[in-house]
Image (spheres, rainbow, N blue to C red):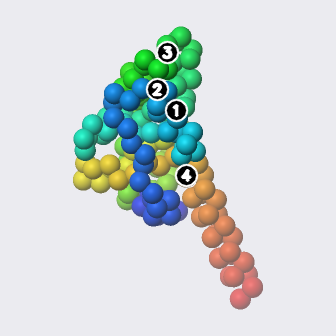
Amino acid sequence: MNNVSSVLTRKNFQPVTVSPGTTVIEALKIMAEKNIGSLVIMEGDNFQGIVTERDYSRKVILKGKNSTETKVSEIMSTDLPSISPSDKIEHCMELMTMKNIRYMPVFENNKLVGIISMSDVVKETILAQKETINQLHSYINS
């Protein structure tokens, strides 16, 4: 199966970032506008964490906090495992399943180079299976 770099190449976009002082409502508006489920929290060039729709529902709505006053730094996930572009997709799937997370930062030389989602992992797995099936068809028909 392929590695993380092949997914990042196929996605061909940089993660959407905001600063730690961004309000939750601003973050939600950005996610809705871009049709994405997470934002990367950066302070300058330093990765701080990821805020997701799940963080919003569990750490704002269910706790009775105010979306216009709460900052993303208060609800972001910071204890995420990280991966590198050379890591295998299977490894990502294992980590995401074990940690019950949907998004993971990808670092190369301590620099954030992308975000991989569970959806990316599933798509890559399906593509790999289709490729295997096509190879088997070719082998059988030759």
Return the residue nearer the eye: 3 or 142. Answer: 3
Seen at 38% across and 29% down, the residue is 22
Does 94 sit above or below residue 85?
above
Distance from disc 3 to disc 4, alpha carbons, whole Å, reads 34 Å
Give the image quarter of residue 14.
bottom left
Q: Are marks 1 and 3 in contact (CB under 8 Å)?
A: no
First reached walking from the N terminus: tag 4 or tag 1: 1
Residue 98: tell me if it is visible.
no
Q: Distance of mark 1 from mark 2, alpha carbons?
A: 6 Å
Name which residue type carries label 3.
Asn
| SS label for mark 1 | helix
Q: Which of the numbered marks, if any, corresponds to residue 28?
A: 1
Which mark is first along the chain, 3 or 1? 1
Q: Residue at x 71, y 88 (%)?
A: 142
The answer to the question of whether label 2 and label 4 lie on touching residues, with beta carbons closer than 8 A, is no
Mark 2 surroundings: few (<14), some (14-19) or many (≥20) residues within 10 A: many
What residue would you read off at disc 3? 66
Q: Which mark is residue 121?
A: 4
Q: Which mark is residue 24?
A: 2
Between the C-alphas of marks 3 and 2, the distance is 8 Å
Please provide percent x and percent y for residue 16. 43, 46
Q: Mark 3 or mark 2: which comes first in sequence?
A: 2
Q: Closer to the camera: disc 2 or disc 4?
A: 2
